[in-house]
Amino acid sequence: MTTDLSSPTTAFGGFLDSQRIVLCRPSHPGNIGAVARAMKTMGLAQGRQLILVNPLCAIDEVALRRASGAADVLESCRIVATLPEALVGCIGVFGMTVRARELGPPPMSPRDAVASAQAFWQGASGAPSAFVFGNETNGLTNEELQFCRAEVSIPTNPDYGSLNLAAAVQIMTYLLREASGMTVQEAAGTTRYASALASSDAVEGFYRQLEAALIGVGFHDPDRPRRLMPKLRRIFERTRLEVDEVNILRGVVSALTDADKRPKVD
């Protein structure tokens, strides 16, 4: 079954799924495979998001090896004869180039380009945008750039600006993933050893125990409290204590309090 990417209402269920990576005249199968891997790593693996315009090589065993598990992206990619065919239905079209062109479209930073793509997607019923990359040796031609709405350059070392095709795609697809909010959601959901956030009453119980322990050892004078407890609260509140963390802290306070009560051995 083929998904029609020309429909502005087709969003594959999300911003990431609506974006296209377009390679104009790619000349090395290994680079095509590496691009597929970069895309799938960042979640651009739905439908036919990879489009090859007049490729100068075949998708062969070299491409499949370099794809390293992203063969499905290669198998579902579209191959078209002209750039306009690849851009049907797109609102945002961003031409990736290492050098500014005198007669090219307006320049834009990578993050601004991704932000524009997201705005187009939000404001036009999930309409797709395309990030267009040129041939590995010569980049985009002036004619190809004329089909783009903006010219985007990835900042590189001015003394050595050579950026591999797949590396450039990796950077832009990471920015697309970041803009979608996926990195934040995943980080929040996959923290190692995480537990649920502690309830207010559980945290207050810890504060009461801590204050009693500090009074017991003479560190805190309840008749002259000054700002000790508010300051301690600020320290812990910055961490958004979890259930396990509260239990550990209460255990530490209990252990130290009990240790202080034990008879000293000469």
Image: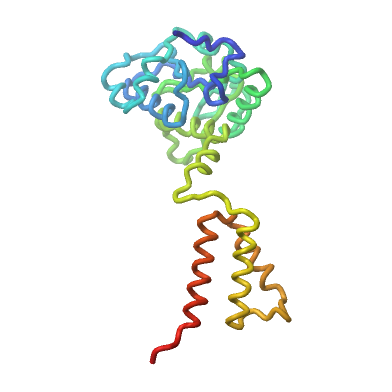
Q: Position of residue 37 (x, y in %)?
A: 38, 28
Across the whole image, how many numbered discs are drawn on residues? 0
Q: Residue 196 vs residue 42: left or right?
A: right
Q: Quadrant of the C terminus?
A: bottom left
Point 56% across, 28% down: residue: 152
Quadrant of res 200: bottom right
Quadrant of res 70: top left
Depicted 231 relative to depicted 155: above or below: below
Q: Quadrant of the N terminus?
A: top left
Q: Residue 122 vs residue 262: left or right?
A: right
- Visual colour scheme: rainbow
Depicted 239 relative to depicted 99: above or below: below
Point 69% across, 68% down: residue: 230
Q: Position of residue 120 (x, y in %)?
A: 64, 22
Q: Residue 10 vs residue 76: left or right?
A: right
The residue sitting at the left extreme is 61
Viewer-proximal residue, 174 or 46? Answer: 46
Point 49% across, 11% down: residue: 3
Point 45% across, 29% down: residue: 169
Viewer-proximal residue, 136 or 66? Answer: 66
Depicted 7 relative to depicted 248: above or below: above
Q: Position of residue 228 (x, y in %)?
A: 67, 73
Q: Position of residue 155 (x, y in %)?
A: 52, 37
Q: Residue 64 vs residue 264: left or right?
A: left
